[in-house]
Amino acid sequence: MAESKYITLMLIPEGTESRRGFRMRTWVFRFAIGAFIALLVGIILFFVFYGKVLTRAALADKLEKENERLLRYQYKVHLLESNLKQAREIVTRVTELAGIDIEFPELPDDSTLFATLDEKGMAVVSRASGLDFSIPSGLPIQGFITQDFEVDNMSQYHPGVDIACAEGTPVLATASGEVIYAGFDSAAYGYVVIVQHSDSVTTLYGHNRELLVQEGQTVLAGGRVAMSGSTGKSTAPHLHYEIRINDKPIDPLGNWYDQKR
């Protein structure tokens, strides 16, 4: 049976209105259907790829801002290094004139510094399984530990650990508890959060850029309390983290819970 060269489309309105028909060639009808399907697929693909383009554009903008911040910090580091070298030269000349025999250690090169940093390793956020959620465990943020706990040497007194991280990294509570302080400490820690846990245990999160909690608020273990920054007495973005029992600082990296018991 030969295929019809024409197709008739009928429009049948409701009521008593007369029917209307449109006659067109078969190949025209098929072309129209194919064009409609191609247009529909094109619209879907457009929105799919357009969403990816928007996501990449936002990521590129974020990376550009982060690069600008890193360039500013790099300039500060170079300036501090230059000032330090000048100060070392001045002190060396003064000691020579005074007849004092003193030798300053040379500044380590970048490879040595990075090797030392790698030895310290990453600060991994982890929590001991089966531990009461009111007991601090793990660390509040991921990054590199740049300064350890030190309370025996008063010249290097440091009642917590410093964790280097990108500015704006979420800071997580290491245990459930109540926020007893959330404000600005101009003396040292800048924007700081202190959380009270069970048995007179408190944790402190310092040098933040932004606080996400208020005093009197209850936080859960793993909940966000702040966004990391470099406020207060700080030379670079990092988080200062402390654990205290009855206001006595405890090494967050040590087996402090067994000592407490």
Image (cartoon, rainbow, N blue to C red):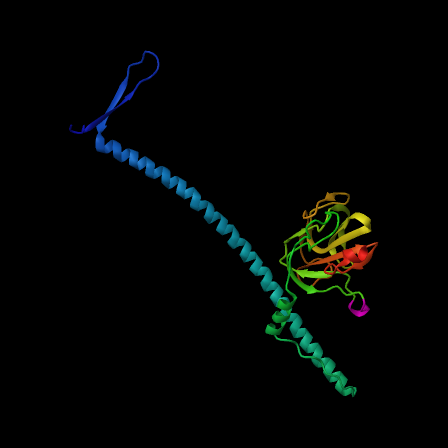
Which quadrant, please, contains the C terminus? Answer: bottom right
Does 231 sit left or right of 18 as displayed?
right
Picture quadrant of residue 34: top left
Q: Nearer the viewer, residue 132 or 77?
A: 132
Q: Quadrant of residue 21?
A: top left
Left/right placement of residue 163 relative to residue 201 reads: left
Main secondary structure found in the magenta portion: helix
Q: Position of residue 138 (x, y in %)?
A: 69, 55
Front position in the image: 235 or 79: 235
Residue 48, how many percent across, how many down?
A: 43, 44
For the residue pair 53 and 116, the one nearer the viewer reads as 116
- From the top left corner, tell me how far across and down residue 173 is, in percent: 70, 50
Residue positioned most to the right: 246
Task: Tell me where residue 118 appears, x and y as whole percent.
Answer: 62, 67
The number of callouts visible is 0
Residue drawn at point x = 57 percent, y = 58 percent:
66
Query: Which residues lie in the magenta part?
Result: 152-156
219 above or below 231?
Answer: above
Give the residue displayed 68% in from the left and 74% down from the top: 83
Is 216 in the magenta? Answer: no
Q: Residue at x 70, y 81 (%)?
A: 89
Residue occupying image coordinates x 80% and y 70%: 155
